[in-house]
Amino acid sequence: MNVELLIESSDPLLHPGELYPDSSPELIARQSWLTPHLYDAASDRLVICMQSFLLRSAGKIILVDTCVGDCKQRPRPEFDGAVWNWLERLEQSGVSPEEVDVVLSTHLHVDHIGWNTRLVDGKWRPTFPNARYLFVDKEYEYWSSDAGRVALQRTGDYVADSVTPIFEAGLADIVDFDHRIDDALRLIPTPGHTPGHVCVEIDSEGKKAIITGDLLHHPLQCRFPDWSTRFCFDAHQARQTRLAFMKQHAHEGTLLFPAHFPSPTAGYLRLVQDEAELRYRYEFVDE
């Protein structure tokens, strides 16, 4: 099975301290390996990729994560009213919106659900009218709760324009934390960044890979695996989930597809021993 990357944007976006509260300008300055591919020193911003993952499995076309979306009203200036033309990239891959069978978001954050819908005649309509949209029960329950609605104040109410229309159209399926999509694809519970965050495991032709969502945000987090992001729902749980995942898959040599790592995205975690503690580095591969 091939994993095709559909990139919406890949640019310097977040200051290190905005993403990782444990970072410092002095520490970042010592990470010379970050520039220029992963960090833009002139703007002091980490390069963050927004992308979807296109899979063809068991005769179906499956999309994992749907980026920011076009024409959405968002508090973040870089997202507000933006036009990315991501849909053209989907069609360049040989897939029309009508041909997509399954849409899954690893979690319901603003940059993973945007292309669930598009603006048609002034209303938000499902972009993929023939697809079933899968929502993990714990994740949907949280963002539908009072606590979730309060959390939306930071990013704007993307549930109203990118999730609710899916339910109104009758295209939504609520699934378990460990749902199996087909014989080759299953969800892995990885809570912490959000309550119902999942990864997607691919097991095909004797090979395994994992789409990791926001379990890891940037290769910098491999060097400092204890760092949770400012955007994590439960920083402690996110840390514990991440450390266990990294230890296991560095040992197993699993091919990973982190949501926001710049192209070529795919790679392996490698364990690095120094005098003080165990650390990791991320080895990009172009497969």
Image: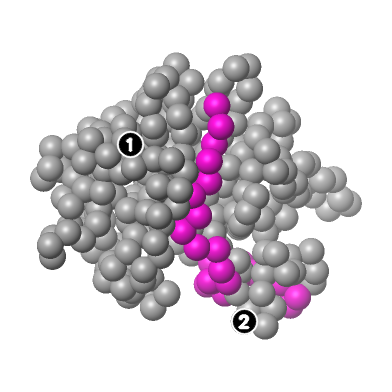
Q: Is residue 64 left or right of residue 135?
A: right
Q: Is residue 223 visible?
A: yes
Chain-order first, disc 1 or disc 2 = 2
> How far apart in space, not on screen, are marks 1 and 2 (Cα)?
38 Å
Q: Nearer the viewer, residue 192 or 88?
A: 88
Q: Position of residue 231 (x, y in %)?
A: 44, 61
Q: Nearer the viewer, residue 233 or 152?
A: 152
Q: Is residue 231 left or right of residue 202?
A: left
Q: Position of residue 191 (x, y in %)?
A: 44, 42
Q: Nearer the viewer, residue 264 or 153?
A: 264
Badge 1 amino acid:
Val
Q: Which residue position holds label 2?
A: 43
Instruction: For mark 1, give the secondary structure.
Output: loop
Q: Which residue position holds label 1?
A: 100
The residue segment tinted magenta is 1-29
Quadrant in which the C terminus is drawn: top right
**Picture residue at 61% right of the left edge, 69% below the top:** 46
Badge 2 amino acid:
Ser
Q: Is 98 colored magenta in this rendering?
A: no
**Picture residue at 64% right of the left edge, 43% below the top:** 266
